[in-house]
Structures are given as structure tokens and as C-alpha cells.
Image: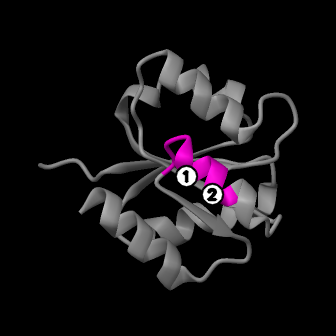
Amino acid sequence: MKRLPLVSVVDDDESVRESLPDLIRLFGFEVQAFSSAAEFLNSGWMERTECLILDVAMPGMSGPELHEELLKRGQKIPVVFITAHKDESESLQLIQNGAVACLFKPFSDVALQETLETILG
């Protein structure tokens, strides 16, 4: 049986970690949620992750810092940043640094689904 593509969500907001995985499962993907960058890095799920949804602002290691760390480790996982701060210049910077997309909270189900389907086919 073919495995579903794994999407990992890293967000310090518990409500996001509870609601987002349910939505992503509805789109037909497997999901793992993590409360911090360190939890994700230590989880053992990194190698299976085919798309990473990362909150920009988190305590400890931020989303962009985690993305940088993954690149240093040679992990070329497609990253979609999510942020509550509507800052177009920050979004552009994240894309220039290799992110696939940056969605502003609250984003629509359709925007997320289209982004994931573009990445994961």
C-alpha cells in the first residue's frame, strides 16, 4: 500500500496544532504536529516529511531559523511558512531564502490545499 505524503506542522500555538492536522488529513495527507523546532528536529519524522508547515515566530528556534538549520543539514524539505504578521517584505525574504510559500493567518482552506497540492502533486 502506498504511503500518503507526510506533512509536518511546527507551531507553538496549540489551537493550530489541533485544527490544522485535521484539515490537512481531509486533503488526503498524513500529518504530524510539533510544538517547537527542537521537538521536530528530535522526532525522527524529519526524513519522512515531504512538506513542512512552519510558524514564523516561535519561542526558542524560530521558523526561519529551523529552515536554515535544515538546509545546513542538507534536508531540502519544501517549507510553507505561516504567520500572523502581515509583512510583505518578510514574506518576500522567506521566499527568497527558499520557502515555497508564506500564508498569512487566518488563511483559507483553499489557499492551503492549493499550496499543498502544488508541492505534493
Total marks shown come to: 2
**Callout 2–callout 1 Cβ contact below 8 Å:** yes
**Residue at image mark 2:** 92
109 w.r.t. 51: above or below: below
Q: Residues within 10 Å of mark 2 (few under 14, many from 20)?
A: few
Look at label 1 and name its amino acid.
Ile
Tag 1 secondary structure: helix
Residue 56 screen position, x and y as percent: 74, 49
Q: Residue at 46% x, 54% y: name it.
A: 100
Numbered circle sitting on residue 95? 1
Q: Residue at 73% x, 72% y: name it.
A: 105
Q: Residues within 10 Å of mark 1 (few under 14, many from 20)?
A: some
Residue 63 seen anywhere in this rendered image of the structure? yes
Q: Could you tell whether 68 is left or right of 60 in the image?
A: left
Look at label 2 and name its amino acid.
Leu
Q: Residue at 46% x, 29% y: name it.
A: 46
**Nearer to me, 25 or 83:** 83
Quadrant where the image shows the C terminus:
bottom left
Q: Quadrant of residue 63?
A: top right
Q: Which region is colored magenta?
A: 91-99
Residue found farthest to the right: 59
Q: Quadrant of residue 27?
A: bottom left
Taking the magenta stretch, the answer to whether it contains residue 95 is yes
Q: Could you tell whether 33 is left or right of 18 in the image?
A: left
